[in-house]
Image (spheres, grey):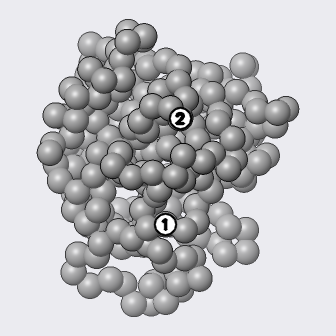
Amino acid sequence: MGRVIWAVFLAVVLSGCAASSVPRPRTSSTGWDRERFLRAHPPSGMPTAEPASFGKRVGALFSHDTKGDHFCTASAVDSPNRNLIITAAHCIHPGKGYGYLSDLVFVPGYRNGNAPYGIWKVKSQLVDTRWSSDSDPDLDVGFAILEPLNGKNIADVLGANLLGINQGFTNFVRVTGYPMTSDSPVTCVNTTTQQYKYQMRFACKGYPPGTSGSPWLTHFDPKTKRGEVVGVIGGYHLGGKGDDVSYSSYFDDDVRRLYEEAVRESVAN
């Protein structure tokens, strides 16, 4: 089922409060100890996502609380105030003709109804004006500022991945996300390619609605447990028409400027 169809469905199911409603999401048990092997021997053909047994910096986005359905994926990204997450723009703002979603929560490490690292309220969101006014698929990237929980910010509890800007279109990445049909995440590794001038492509089966916003993580350091987010599922066809090929807007200087704006807003708040 296409992303746009899911967008309409979610808009009906998950709205009720805010001016708009929730869009169309998408989204081993391989561990990072296999990363060196996989880099040396990349998957041939079309791999398939497997259940993820790790990845606490990745979580599910819910409307209000975990009693409802999760509809997108997000992840903690490094910032001076240690309170930012990154996702697809359409996960927090459906685009032209709509406004920001409200009453959202981020649940890192969510699994089978459990929230091992807490339920974090979204305080504010930020997308590029070219997304909010024109739904530009090349700018389907968004940031959200989280409220503190028990006196700590999200990165104080989880740590955070770096933001990778202008890293090129070919990167060996791990993509971890939450399908709407599952209460646990899936993950897959492969090498990205260029789709269009400002779009990247990631081929792996198993990324249905719900996985929009899933981070594309490269340059993972097993010592620090930290990598660089160089993409998120979104962009072209809102991340993809099917569950086997996913897309991301390219992270260039436009994304860097958006991040810097989010940092300024997070400090001001």
Residue at (42%, 11%) from the top-left corner?
18
Numbered disc in front, either 1 or 2: 2
User: Label 1 vs label 2: CA separation?
Assistant: 20 Å
Circle nearer the N terminus (1, 2):
1
The residue indicated by pointer 1 is 52
Percent from the top left, x then y, of residue 13? Answer: 31, 24
| On-image quarter of the C terminus | top right
Position of residue 2 relative to residue 163, above or below, is above
Residue at (22%, 62%) from the top-left corner?
244
Camera sees residue 254: no
The circle on residue 159 is none
The local crowd at label 1, few if under 14, some if 14 to 19, many if 20 or more residues have their Cα within 10 Å, is some
State the SS at label 1: loop
Camera sees residue 267: yes
Residue at (23%, 44%) from the top-left corner?
236
**Kind of residue sitting beneath label 1:** Ala
The local crowd at label 2, few if under 14, some if 14 to 19, many if 20 or more residues have their Cα within 10 Å, is some
Residue at (35%, 45%) from the top-left corner?
180
Position of residue 93 relative to residue 206, above or below, is above
Percent from the top left, x then y, of residue 60? Answer: 50, 43
Question: Which of the 4 image quarters holds residue 174?
Answer: bottom left
Percent from the top left, x then y, of residue 76? Answer: 61, 46
| On-image quarter of the N terminus | top left
**Kind of residue sitting beneath label 2:** Thr
Q: Which sits in the foreground, 181 or 2?
A: 181
Question: In screen coordinates, is 160 left or right of 94?
Answer: right
Q: Which sits in the foreground, 65 or 153?
A: 65
The residue indicated by pointer 2 is 66
Q: Residue at the far right: name it.
A: 151
Question: In screen coordinates, is 69 left or right of 156?
Answer: left
Q: Are marks 1 and 2 in contact (CB under 8 Å)?
A: no
Percent from the top left, x then y, of residue 78? Answer: 67, 47
